Image: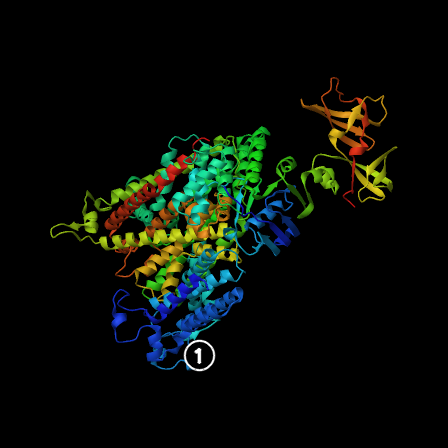
Amino acid sequence: MNTNNTGTVRFDGVVKKYGTVTALKNLDLTINAGQLVTLLGPSGCGKTTTLRLIAGLEMATSGKIHIGGEDVTHLTATYRKVSMVFQSYALFPHMTVRENVAYGLTVKSMPKTEAAQKAEHGLELVGLKGFGDRLPSELSGGQQQRVAVARAIVLEPEVLLLDEPLSNLDAKLRRHVREEIRQIQQRLGLTAVYVTHDQEEAMAVSDRIVVMKNAEIAQEGAPHDLYERPNSSFIADFIGDANLALCEVTSVAEQLAQVRLGDTAYAVPSGDFTSGEANLVLRPHEIRLTPPSTPGLRGSISYAAYLGKEIQYTVETDHGSLFVVSPIANDPFQQGDDVSVQLDQTRMRLVATDAG
Amino acid sequence: MKRTIVIWLIALFIGFAVLPWHMTNDGFLSSEWLVGATPTTALWLIVQDGQWWLIGPLLAGLYISCIQLSVKNPVRRAKLSVLGAAIGLVLTMIQGLIIVRSGPRILNSLFEGTAAIDGQLGFGLGAGLCLISLLFILTNALTQTGKAQGDAFVISMIGLIIALVAVFVFYPVLHILIRAFQVEDGYSFYGFFPRFFSSSIWGLQCLTGGRSCGTAINSLFLATMTGAGTTLLGLSFALILTRTQFRAKKLLRVLTIIPIITPPFVIGLALILLFGRNGTITAFVADFFDISRTRWLYGFWGVYFAQLLSFTPIAFLVLIGVVQGVSPSMEEASQTLGADRWETFRQVSLPLMRPGLANAFLLGFIESLADFGNPLVLGGNYGVLSTDIYFAIVGSVADPANAAVLSIALLTLTLSAFLLQRKWVGKKSYATITGKADSGQNASLSPGVKALCYLTALPWAALTVVVYSMIVFGSFVKLWGYNHSFTFEHYLRAFRIDFSNGWRFTGVAWDSFFTTLTISSIAAPLTALIGLSTAYLLVRQKFVGKEAFEFSTMLSFAIPGTVIGVSYIMAFNFPPIELTGTSIILIIVFVFRNMPVGVRGGIAAMSQLDSSLDEASTTLGANSFTTVRRVIMPLMGPAILAALTYSFVRAITSVSAVIFLVSARHNMATSFIVGRVENGEFGIAIAYSAVLIVTMLIAILLLQLLIGTRRLRRTDRVQQPS
């Protein structure tokens, strides 16, 4: 299928209010053609509102929205070249799979046979060839999800929108389906906007991630950027787990900040910090635990959980409790053991404390 | 320039220059207006007759055409067109309302010449088309101003429904208000109050002396008793059906449904046959205990009895939903916390049902106030508002002003109950039906409650059975109470077909029977259409003034049929909208009386359809009309069936509004039967009622077959295992 008509999406100062509640404050956002961009954030952060604004299901209170260079701010969903995969899939229960997929084509008065052909092709694309005569209720959840994707892409939309498309699938199926979605998107070169609250899912499928919080963008960038260079404690914690330890920046020289955490000093990439309080980002799997006889931060295990592929510890230290993920060892620590905590200063990051 | 606006402009000019502006006596099918010598189109009337006041639509049409052709900025063009259409509408309506034969005449000096002094006939085809065209130009232009959300289809639908409700609900009620202020010569503001607060309406004499209370007090007392009684009986039935292992549940269900397809006064008739002076039971008791026969049935107790029988099913239908809505897990939680069945019922289930009980009470209250058939047949000297209104119009001393005052009193009561219900009950719902499956078992009733339910509900069910057998039995005997020999005479008189000379329907009932069926069959789909469209707008669309829109569409539910009837003859007996004596007015009255139920059913059904289905359809490029046609309608089968059935049945069984609006040419079954009852011809009245009930049963079954099978197949397909 040929989809060269993908478009960029641009938000210029878009505000959305429901009565007195502000769902989006002044959003500026550009989504480049051919990319899969994820809107990620906790519930109520405005990500779904953003998606519905692109779809035309909600109208902006102020600001401008452009799709493919065209101003669509006042166009309703019917007239935008955008299609959407819904969280509930929203397959029409009284139509067969083929009728569902062909629906968007037939309402644009495409001849029935041609529409059926295109629908068949769309079904083939998602690996459901031969399922056309079934009813949606006769398909499994994963298959229904793929019908919803097929129904959206046969229209060759400028932008494909996906609203938490995996949330109704069981955990094992999720990884498989998200790979498929990503492959179809890349093969067709579609511009896609994907909404989820699951950071792992976002990392796995996206070219770029837009993290939202409290009706505005917290940070945007490639998955790698967000993980490696979080700009706030919120991002550090939200993208991959992180222990945040309050520390003091004492001096900065040549991009390296001298940081005191209790008695110990570390040299950490400084970023914009010059002095004062900051949070040290300590990733759980980058912390090593050694026997108490070795030098390091003193701690004791308050909780240990054996997960097969790894062991998760909660370690109480003078700087708060740390969440630590360790590979399986022959002789794991037990609850109540004293340990010495080893921190790798080359992997540490500094982020602002959220209060500041 | 938008195509739809052009089409409506053309329609506007056709209505103005080609079709007859006023009503024609010969009806529209006769071509008199095309070839006749006298001018009939608005254009001709202006040119030939100098009736310049008709020029509004023409001016608006020309103005809008100019705007559409000359203004380039689409938003500005749309705004100016909205203005033009609005002015055209207002001008047309004002001239229709002030150039009339009688009534208040303002700006008299402006309108000279005999045409203006004589007044004009009602709006005809041309005027109607002009008004509708202007309305749709307005709504279409409104969509293009960018202010309105939603597309042309939705805005036009909102506009149309508002216009219809305004003309056929608010306009007539307004007429009653005006009439109530009318005195012998003109209108008086202060004359109204002494009449409204007179002791014949609100008097409380019955508390102190032997004299009877005011009619409003009578109505109020009756309504309170009926509301309480039907709620208790309904609750008993609902509890037996949902919380016990009672064997004949199906039978109980049927018994509670049948009264809905019974014309309201039929139960009154059956009660007369049983408990009247010559009734079976009266005779039996009188012979057995040797006490003299009385006329106790004619008065408060008779009406109360009949209303309990008539309205318990309504309470039951409300309460069964409420009882089922109480989440089993709440009752289980209560039981695991150590409460026994009685404590659980008293402390958990009952409080959870309280809003539902209040709702059922208020519904029974409103129904009782609005009831007309039972008080008419059984009321005797116990005057209530609804029948007094009737007698004020048709009685020996016709007093429309008094009817208007009584109507306002009745309206005040029902509207208060309606507002109370919405304000108080509407918001406080503990309905616990969520999307999630709620497993578990409802607690069964404690022995005491169970016994109480059985003791009230079962005798009641037995009585219902007796009442209905009376209807069948009574139609086959010669003269009830005197001559109990078997006869087909009543059926023959009513429904004789003469084969001697081809087919001839010579029975006395055929005319009204056919009229009733025709009018109900036309009204039912219209009611369903308007009701469900309104529901769609309310559930699925966002627009300014939605609350007011919902309120005004539900309002006609609170307006008693008698009041509607009176208001219709007051409003539509004269130009500009002259409809009395036609069959159209009967259809209209049914549509707007029964619309609220269609709206409610539609809202309930629509709320169960996930809105993402609509959204999916629109993001796939369908407009609202296509979405409704291809997605919503097919999934709404059951709701459509319910709305159709209900409005059909209500159209056949309704008396109150109809009795004012029937004419010799268009008589309805119910008013025919009431006429027979008033003449004391019980046999034929009951035979006719039995035929009506059977007809409705057949119609319901046919509808089920027609729509129901399609629905069943779908449900089957949907429910196949995934």
> Label 1 is placed on what type of residue?
Leu
Q: Is B59 in front, or is A273?
A: A273
Q: Quadrant of residue B476?
A: top left
x and y, in percent, of residue B375 in the image: 36, 53
Residue found 81% across the figure and 27% down from its top: A341
Looking at the image, can residue B452 be seen?
no
x and y, in percent, of residue A150 in the image: 49, 39
x and y, in percent, of residue A282 in the image: 77, 33
Residue under circle 1? Answer: B107
- Local crowd size for mark 1, using a 10 Å CA cut-off: few (<14), some (14–19), many (≥20): few
Q: How many marks?
A: 1
Q: Is B547 in front, or is B513?
A: B547
Residue found 83% across the figure and 31% down from its top: A318
Looking at the image, can residue B582 be seen?
yes
Residue found 22% across the figure and 53% down from its top: B510
Residue that lies at the very extreme toward the top in this rendered image: A330
- B466 relative position to B488: left or right: right
x and y, in percent, of residue A316 in the image: 79, 29
